[in-house]
Amino acid sequence: MDVAHSDTYEELDLEAAVEQAKSSQGISYVLTDRQKGAIYSVLKGNDTFVNLPTGYGKSMVYQLVPQCVDFMKLKQGHKESASVAVVISPLVSLMRDQVKTLRQRNVTAGYVTDVLKQPVEMALLRQGKLSIVFASPETLLGPLGRELLTSSVYQHNLCGIFVDEGHCVAKWGFKSGKLDAFRKSYSCIAEVRSLVPSTVPMTALTATASPEVKKTILQSLGMSNVNTIQVSPERTNIKYSVTSTLAKDPDSQFHWLFRDIQEHRKQTPKLIIFCQTHRQCRELHAAFEDNLGEDLIFHIAMYHSCTEEQRKEKVMEDFTKAGSFIRVLIATVAFGMGVHVEELYNVLHYGPARDVDDYFQETGRIGRDGKQSYATLLNDKCDCSSDSCNADVTKGWLAKHLMRPSASTETPQHFHPQMRTVTDSQRVELQQKVEAYRDSLLQGQEDAMYSGIDMTSGISVSLISTIVQNCHLICSYEDLLKYPFFNDTDAKEIWNVITETLGTEFSSDIVCDTDSDSESDDSVEDEQSQHSSEDIVSRPVLSSNSSSSSD
């Protein structure tokens, strides 16, 4: 064990170890400096706190470390070894997803819980034949976990303990007000350190941790002399919005989505609707069933902690792959942390998350490939009479920290190959024509008007205003697709309106004054702190990313 970690490792040796581990797993892309920095820190035997955004690739740290340690041991002249990393994970769905990914890369990995104990896997587990072992804190602190960690195999080969989704330590491990701890075992993980050699480092990984949460995590896990690897949790490819409707029942609130599913079926852009309770999930699923009928309800699925394990597996297997049959998933936080879903660019919160950290975790499921994505908070399902209303807290935080001018709302401060000349009268005419098109979408939709014009039509007042304001920069259909349209049909129709009104004549090779860029950055920073929650675009957006580019 002692030979596995050393402060005297040369940087070149560490880099060679990482490249060897990547090669053996068929990983061709270049790791970021922060990913490598976290791996190097663990290999040197340091306790490490990894705070990187969702989709950043935090899991690469524990996925590569065992093979890196084996490489370093061989380089030091020791006989071939089989290092083991133990990963404490909060959800079976996350463990299952990680194990599936690792096995596809020929990594020996497995997971165990107090309920799921397969005979073959248990034998491999006890023999130390699995290089990465996932377990819940309850299992690891129970009889089986203690048996494994104190066995000679693990005493000799354990190269690190990794607490994935480390914010769960603070969120779930302690009493909150009058509520007992959700999962008390999370506050007891430090006990594991008394069972393993003192040279085994502890690593906590999370996408979201306020200073208070970080302090709680480090203290609870007994981490000392900690190396911190972190960046802001902000995901620049996600547009955040908060909206509300006049309607208070799901039938009216989601009429726009029912219509889209009826029209597009399996081509409907994927969407997760996060609910805060099982009851909300059931009520919402019942509304979809009533409005879609037997022929279409199969495109909708529900996922929460009480969903049967077999059903969870089927939902996870289908929804996470490209071209999935399930297009809308109604879920609680039970579906989320760390799970990678292909072609997912939309998430809607049916009421606010418990806090901003949870909100970022749940919105972190979208746009993991870097493409433009949309997170909408529907705050109708909230009693905002309290000063500590979750929706108001979340809106205020978003307005202060994330509601910066984006590619679709500001005059870009970089090179524009084309720009058109637009008169004030043309802007007025354009706005009138676009509003007329939106009004045409409302015909025959009187019953759905309780949802509000924005939700029923899918084209918000804010969107129209933004397009009119920036129409001099919209010189191609691709330019228009950078704006948050509900579907391609609306985008095409509005593009026709733009060309009909403004023509197709452009000025070329226009370059903005780069000398003023640095000053404008500072002014944007000042404006951000003054944004109110009303500045946030108030409309639900579903993006298929069928032809839009990744910003």
Image (spheres, rainbow, N blue to C red):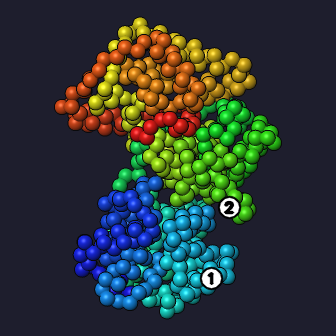
Q: In which quarter of the image is the N terminus?
A: bottom left
As shown in the figure, which amino acid type bears the numbered disc 1? Met
Q: Mark 1 points at which residue?
A: 122
Residue 182, label in figure: none
Answer with left or right where residue 404 lies relative to residue 269. left
Task: Inspect this view and state whether residue 396 appears.
Answer: no
Name of the residue lying farthest toward the left: 515
Q: Nearer the viewer, residue 35 or 170?
A: 35
Sequence-wise, which precedes: disc 1 or disc 2? 1
Relative placement, left or right, of 125 versus 306 is: left
Which residue, as the protein is rendered here, is positioned at the far right? 294
Q: Residue at x 55, y 46 (%)?
A: 343
Badge 2 element: helix
Query: Where's the C terminus, which quadrant?
Result: top left
Residue 232 drawn at (x, y percent): 37, 52
Label 1 neighbour load within 10 Å: few <14, some 14-19, many 20+: some
* Residue 246, horizontal then vertical, whole percent: 65, 29
Tell me if label 1 and label 2 are in contact, CB under 8 Å.
Answer: no
Q: Which mark is residue 313?
A: 2
Disc 1, SS: helix
Which residue is painted at 53% across and 30% down in the image? 485
Q: Relative to the observer, which residue lies in front, 185 or 260?
A: 260
Residue at far top of view? 425
> Looking at the image, which is closer to me, 473 or 382?
473
Residue lying at 59% horizontally and 19% vertically, measured from the top left = 438
